[in-house]
Amino acid sequence: MENLKILLVDDEEEFVTTLAERLELRGLQARAALNGEDALHMIEADTPQIVILDVMMPGLGGLEVLKRIKARHSQIPVILLTGRGSTKEGIKGMQLGAFDYLMKPLDIEELIKKMQEAIKSQP
């Protein structure tokens, strides 16, 4: 998993910046987008190997971003992040093509394990 290109998408700047730093310390290449529009542009400019996507964001929400990613880049695994004790959006996201979902607050080891599973599941 070394050098894995990850795109983190979350409107909470402190959270996404800290997560990117923690992943980079583990030898992964993590870039961050603070909204769905920026994420879609970043995917077109430099396609990541996996996307970690927050469901609840202002503007273009996570489920809509997921639909657009899957429409153009169906091979990219997407792991959703849900908060506020809600699993409904995570389940809906999986129906839309997400690999899995994780609840916030996030356990980084669990995230890394899910990313490994997602990459291994790719043809």
Image: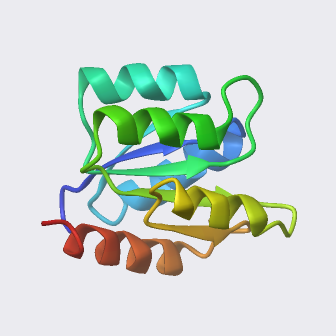
Q: Residue furthest left?
A: 123
Which residue is found at the position 54% from the left and 61% from the top? 95
Relative to 81, say whether 12 is above or below.
above
Q: Residue furthest right?
A: 84
Which residue is found at the position 65% from the left and 67% from the top? 91
Which residue is found at the position 29% from the left and 23% from the top? 44
**Residue 121 placement, left or right of 40:** left
How was this image coloured?
rainbow
Q: Residue furthest front?
A: 95
Q: Quadrant of the N terminus?
A: bottom left
**Residue 105 placement, left or right of 100:** right
Relative to 29, say whether 111 is above or below.
below
**Residue 99 placement, left or right of 57:** left
Relative to 91, say whether 18 is above or below.
above
Is residue 10 something one can see in this rendering?
Answer: no
Residue 76 at what x, y percent from top left?
29, 50
Residue 105 at what x, y percent from top left?
74, 68
Camera-nearest residue between 96 and 123: 96
**Residue 86 placement, left or right of 12:** right
Which residue is found at the position 57% from the left and 28% from the top? 36
Q: Quadrant of residue 71?
A: top left
Q: Quadrant of residue 82?
A: bottom right
Count of picture labels: 0
Residue 40 at what x, y percent from top left?
43, 25
